[in-house]
Image (cartoon, rainbow, N blue to C red):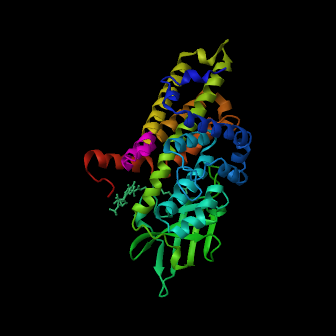
Amino acid sequence: AADLDKSDLLNLEGLLSEVEIQLRDKVRAFVDERFRPSIADWYENAHFPVEIVREMGELGLLGMHLHGYGCPGRSAVEYGLAAMELEAGDSGLRTFVSVQGSLAMSAIHKFGSEEQKNRYLPGMAKGEIIGCFGLTEPTAGSDPGSMATTATRNDDGSWTLNGAKRWIGLASIADIAVIWAATDEGIRGFLVPTDTAGFTATPIEQKLSMRASIQCDIDIADVQLPAEAVLPDVRGLKGPFSCLNEARYGIMWGAMGAARDSYEVALKYAQERMQFDKPLSGYQITQQKLVNMVLEIQKGILVALQTGRLKDAGTLDPVQISVGKLNNCREAIAICREARTMLGGNGITLEYSPLRHANNLESVRTYEGTDEVHTLILGRHITGEQAFR
Ligand code: TGC
């Protein structure tokens, strides 16, 4: 059987504190106990396990890097380690935590009024209130500045919202939606209770990726909101982009969790599977695949850890997040696909995780900034030339 300690070639474990290791192990145990036994069925049946949301709240996984208002107040590295363990289970599980904590809660925490923070954040941290984050639209993906959703201020100070959002995680099970809309004063964020008349969220079906997770179309038809529904403290795209920074940071860790899980499955299989009278792991091509995988996992975790240390020190530049989001998603999907090849035909079933992870990572490399967007962010940084427009 696989001796997985041998795969930590550079002793990355030694870079973690006792507290970080304890937190990581707690989340790993939760994933093993509550998620792994059912994930194949959930994935096949396109079921998001809403029943474990409150358990995630009790574990301190929701808004875990936020401070005050009932939030756990953990470090960026602890949050990253948790994301890695969750995504070793399934990207859909990590996505829930990202949308709830990094996007919806983060928007309220960064830009909300005291009243909004006190009203929503404690319940969201417990998993009693589910949030979603509506930025992307049917015709505005990589270019959210071209959004068509509008918010118009009425004579009495209240607001009318019209438009549509697409690919919005959790929207059909959410209680509160953070909706970004164009106003006369630039893009602003609105807290929309999902039972407001005119607000309709419909899950997108027939997905080949993220099947144990929910993404929705949202229709916004003459939604009436009181004056105090707007997030008071931000105008312009830097509002949603600051929240995306948080989610993108978690993704760079999460992708390495999916990669690590695929590697571990492939290693164990190769050591046990006999062909031509010897284990697959005794073949040079198999060893080369495993070595290439483990090198990229070690490098990807180092990238994530350094990014987390910079974040905890308060010196992280958003450009640096693009390094990890781009690199770790790109490498993770290659690792999961390579792991699938080592499982032969057995690798196309849900009995083994690599193809499920690879399919999930098609979404992960696309949302929160595609490979292309992060390449252009880095290209702009190193050349000084804007290549988006
Ligand atoms: P640009 O002119 O570069 O910037 C506009 C304003 O935003 C500021 N800014 C940032 N602020 C904080 N963090 C960042 N990372 C920031 N990036 C930009 C910038 O300083 C500027 O501020 P100001 O005050 O000068 O106005 O904007 P651009 O539109 O030209 O940017 C180009 C580009 C491609 C980098 C950007 O549009 C981009 O990142 N596009 C990708 C969008 C994306 O990641 N979408 C995913 C949305 S997630 C979602 O809706 C649902 S998925 C999750 C789920 O629900 O499951």
- Residues 232 and 319: in front is 232
Task: Classify the position of the C terminus by image quarter.
Answer: bottom left
Residue 235 in view, yes or no: yes
Residue 336 in view, yes or no: no
Above or below for 189 versus 244: below
Figure disc tally? 0
- Residues 317 and 333: in front is 317
Above or below for 232 versus 32: below
Residue 125 in the figure: left or right of residue 235: right
| Rendered location of residue 369, percent (x, y) | 45, 52
| Rendered location of residue 147, percent (x, y) | 44, 67
Above or below for 297 versus 386: above
Does the magenta stretch mainly form a helix, a strand or a loop?
Answer: helix
| Rendered location of residue 324, percent (x, y) | 44, 41
Instruction: Tell me if residue 322 is in the magenta stretch.
Output: yes
Residue shown at 58%/54% (left/top)?
A: 71
- Residues 258 and 189: in front is 189
Residue shown at 59%/14% (left/top)?
A: 282
Residue shown at 43%/43% (left/top)?
A: 326
Task: Look at the image and give the residue range highlighted in magenta.
Answer: 308-327
Above or below for 143 versus 280: below
